[in-house]
Image (cartoon, grey):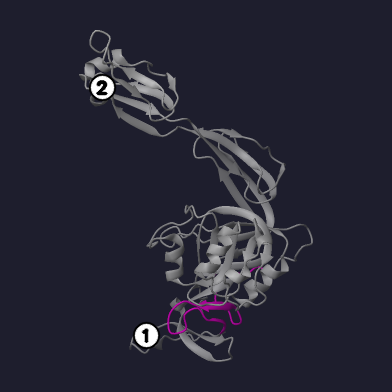
Amino acid sequence: MANAYTPGLKVTNRMPHKIVRMLPIKGDVMVKVGDKVNADAIVAATYMPGDVYPLNMANMLAVPPKDVGSLMLHKEGGKVVEGEPIAETAGIFGKFKKKYNSPYAGTIETISEVTGQVILRGPDIPVEVKAYVTGTVTEVNPEIGCTIETDVAFIQGIFGIGGETCGPVKFAVQNYDETLTATNITADMKGCIVIGGARLTDEGIEAARKAGVAALIGGGMDDQDLKEFLGYDLGVAITGSEKKGITVIVTEGFGDIAMAARTFDLLKQFEGHEASVNGATQIRAGVMRPEIIIPLEAGDCEEEGDDVGGQLKIGLPLRIIRDPYFGIIGTVSGLPAEPHVLGSGSKARVLEVKLNSGESVIVPRANVELIEA
């Protein structure tokens, strides 16, 4: 029989990991091949052009556009500070002059005597790229970035918000099926990657944000709690750019869903270790999942056996991602070769799943995803 495959999220206690760190435009790369870097080390830096502020100076001064150039107190390339006069009319007999004070700091980029418009460019914006993970620089692309490699424990989540952050792993709950509320958050969690169990409540997330928690990880989240925390409906989008002061990742899905015991136990194994977390998620073309990366030292963990990614085999752990068993964890217990007639009357390839409760159910193969090693 031909092999069967299905998508899956990777959860593994050790694997080699390579990450490319790049600047948005050319700049300075501050490391060389062979350097050991920490997650918070700056590996590259540059300056982005500042914001552009168009100023309709002809209207501001009530003069023809062709007169604007002669009334400017600074020429093109001149630097100004906020509140400084940058243009002034001659007035009448030296009186009744009209001044225009710059509402921004920056550099005068262009003065047009055709439109009467002045373009003010704000100060350059410094951009720094951090290593994100602790590891060794294995490749450098001059003026662009570098590649960092290391062995890691690696966990992919279902959904996240917030960008890259790092900190020590700390547990807020004792069990994988425990709901995280505000009472689970303590002051000593500041700067930590805090692990919950099942649902992350809105008050729990807000308490973590106020306590300075770097990232919060849990099994599930109610979509209404997400809306209340963000202040708006997220819709279909690429996440990761939210400016909420905390990164949040759910490993299983939306709803009151417990974290997979295997994921919880793996994280528990690395309590106190430094972890790197990114909540960026994209669920359409070019799928991107949130991730938890824990760099390892030699001997921390033995690497798990290699499996062909996504291949269905008896005994592999999986998650059902459609009703009526949405979010339930189980293992592959059977792979019938022939298509099965579903309740709707249609035919589909199915598999048998043994749930953690001991019950066995038949579900379409399209309705599951592997929890990959």
Q: Residue at x 46, y 76 (%)?
A: 321
Left or right relative to 138: residue 103: left
| Residue 70 forms part of the magenta stretch | no
Q: Is residue 85 above or below residue 291?
A: above
Among all residues in the image, which is located at the extreme left? 64
Disc number for residue 61: 2
In the image, 189 versus 301, the foreground residue is 189
In the image, 119 versus 277, the foreground residue is 119
Among all residues in the image, which is located at the extreme front? 95
Q: Is residue 100 above or below residue 208?
A: above
Q: Amino acid at mark 2?
A: Leu
Residue 50, given in percent of the width and then of the height, sits at 44, 33
Left or right relative to 233: residue 56: left
Q: Quadrant of residue 271?
A: bottom right
Q: Residue at x 49, y 36 (%)?
A: 25
Disc number for residue 9: none
For residue 249, say whether it is visible: no
Q: Quadrant of residue 237?
A: bottom left
Residue underneath mark 1? 347
Q: Is residue 68 above or below residue 191?
A: above
Viewport quadrant of the C terminus: bottom right
Among all residues in the image, which is located at the extreme bottom? 359
Disc 2 versus disc 1: nearer the observer: 2
Q: CA distance from mark 2 to mark 1?
A: 75 Å
Q: Which residues are magenta?
A: 305-332
Q: Is residue 2 above or below residue 284?
A: below
Q: Amino acid at mark 1?
A: Lys
Task: Bin the neighbour count of mark 1 within 10 Å (Cα to Cα): few under 14, some 14-19, many 20 and up.
Answer: few
Q: Quadrant of residue 130?
A: top right
Residue 126, given in percent of the width and then of the height, sits at 53, 35
Residue at disc 2, secondary structure: helix
